[in-house]
Amino acid sequence: MTVASDEDPHPEEPKRLALPDAPDDEGKRTFLKIAIVASGLLAAGAAGSVARSLISPSPPAASAPTTFPRVKVATLTDLTVGVPVIFDYPLDTEPNVLVKLGQSATNGIGPDGDIVAFSLVCQHLGCIWGFLPTGTSPPCNMSYKAPEPVGYCCCHGSVFDLTSAARVVGGPSPRPQPQVQLEVDASGAIYAVGMGPPTIFGHDTGSSDVTADLQGGNPVG
Ligand code: FES
């Protein structure tokens, strides 16, 4: 797998993350868990779409909703620092990662302001990136050690600082990752209620209207 310094000769073709066979530390396992689960969600969604199209003709196109769904995605008491939770939002084929970082983060929620969530679809060319706790390495680049909790995309080496709204701190991504807007209620239930800009990769119409994220699929919920 190549990274930023070994640019892919065909960057116009998004690729899925290629994973090694034998991760041997917690960082690798976490990274692999995200990438595998997220890739499975995408594959399942794609397969489901194909199957549905073969079984019955597509219904007439309905106008896309203009408000984001409000969906429970986690519970405060179930979260452990550094252990990611994967969920689809706002469409049922779009994976995101929610994680309690263990340190204050931009737009973080919860009693410690450290719970954040982001789209896992890389803003560079649409690969699925993985979460790296501080001090860990991605399986594709053992020479890299995360200086803070980051997202690392093994396709071309983009790095996103998850404590700072997923700003780009390495690699070719032209934009940060879209941040999921979260709310927590009095019972500790955590809800996804919207997406912050930029639009999720694949939805970029050139418009600043973030509801472009709701076009092209089935909203969750
Ligand atoms: S798709 Fe190129 S760095 Fe993520």
Image: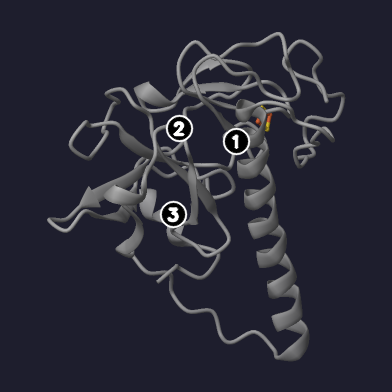
In the rendered structure, which disc, 1 or 2, sits on the residue that comes first in sequence? 1
Q: In front: 166, or 196?
A: 166
Q: Position of residue 185 (x, y in %)?
A: 16, 56
Q: Residue at x 71, y 8 (%)?
A: 143
Q: Position of residue 173 (x, y in %)?
A: 59, 24
Circle 3: element type: helix
The amino acid type, in three-letter code, at marker 2 is Gly
| Residue 30: mark in rendering | 1
66 to 8, vertically: above or below: below
Q: Are marks 1 and 2 in contact (CB under 8 Å)?
A: yes
The amino acid type, in three-letter code, at marker 3 is Ala
Q: Position of residue 79 (x, y in %)?
A: 37, 44
| Residue 212: mark in rendering | 3
Q: Quadrant of residue 208?
A: top left
In the rendered image, which residue does mark 2 sit on? 82
Per the model, the C-alpha gap separating discs 1 and 2 is 9 Å
150 to 83, vertically: above or below: above
From the viewer's perspective, tell me whether residue 168 is left or right of residue 29: left
Circle 1: element type: helix
